[in-house]
Amino acid sequence: MWKYVISIWVLALTGQLTWAQQENLPNAQAPDSVIYKKTYGLRAGIDLASLIRTGLDDQYSGFQILADFRLSPRLYVAGELGNESLEQELDRVDYKGAGSFLKAGVDYNFYTNWLDMDNMLYGGARLGVASMTQELRRYDYNLDNEYFPIFTNVDNREFDGLSAVWLEIQAGVKVEVLNNLYLTANLQLKRSITQDTPEGFDNLFIPGFGRTFDTSEIGVGYSYGIVYRIPLFKK
């Protein structure tokens, strides 16, 4: 009987000592209640896709800056700023489109990070605006039969002061590879809202939007790049 009494007394004493030690620890906190604060700051970088295409495609030139800023743990204000030009010689037309563009909107992170990770699997929306020029160098008259020769008109006209507006939906990822350094990639679906059309000619390329087609107001695009976040504060 004394053996059981001594065992109970030892267990009670051990529990009391453990409780006393926890009481003496400053700001003691249970391991499962640790809170990881999120870093807030400006994240900016460059689009590698346009730089690589510039180096590989003699008819294309482009540069784009990527940026975002965290508003809440999952919501970001985001945008892109850049310039592009495309010069093409096709069977029926030679043209060049060039200009600058700005896209601004928001991104929402659907990914739940583990512990202090800070990756993104996001969906976003942008309103895009472009200021551009279109140059028509040559075009062939469109004939629906093969019995008459095709007449070529050398025009060399330039239309400047043009603008275009579109709505863009993005889906992408941003992965932190080093502290505050991220790799990013996305796919883009675009719909034209309005555009200035040159007299007697159509916009064949809109900076930031891409190639245009007579039968559709829909465009697609992609981007992948590298960005760095300047940490400002945590909360």
Image (cartoon, rainbow, N blue to C red):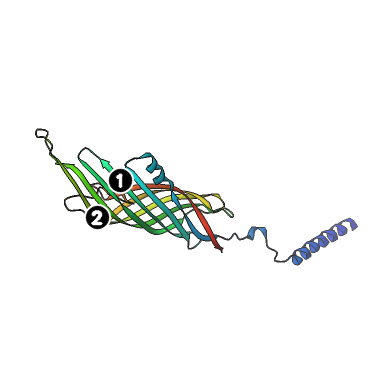
- Residue beneath label 2, please? 160
Residue at the image point whose x is 67% and y is 58% from the top: 31
Residue furthest to the top in view is 147
Q: Secondary structure at mark 2?
A: strand
Q: Is residue 98 above or below residue 22?
A: above
Q: Of the residues under marks 1 and 2, which one precedes in the sequence?
A: 1
Q: Position of residue 138 (x, y in %)?
A: 19, 43
Q: Is residue 196 above or below residue 148?
A: below
Which amino acid does the dot numbered 1 rest on? Leu
- For this rendering, which residue is in front, 233 or 27? 233
Q: Is 40 displayed left or right of 196 in the figure?
A: right
- For this rendering, which residue is in front, 215 or 16? 215
Q: Position of residue 226 (x, y in %)?
A: 48, 49
- For this rendering, which residue is in front, 33 or 94? 94
Res 11 → quadrant: bottom right
Residue at the image point whose x is 35% and y is 46% from the top: 61
Res 161 → quadrant: bottom left
Which amino acid does the dot numbered 2 rest on? Asp
One can see residue 103 in this view: yes
- Residue beneath label 1, please? 86
Q: Position of residue 148 (x, y in %)?
A: 9, 34
Quarter of the image containing the N terminus?
Answer: bottom right
Q: Residues within 10 Å of mark 1 (few under 14, many from 20)?
A: many
Residue at the image point whose x is 42% and y is 53% from the top: 65
Q: Secondary structure at mark 1?
A: strand
Circles 1 and 2, Cβ within 8 Å, touching? The answer is no
Q: Is 70 displayed left or right of 146 in the figure?
A: right
Q: Position of residue 103 (x, y in %)?
A: 37, 57
Q: Is 189 displayed left or right of 195 in the figure?
A: right
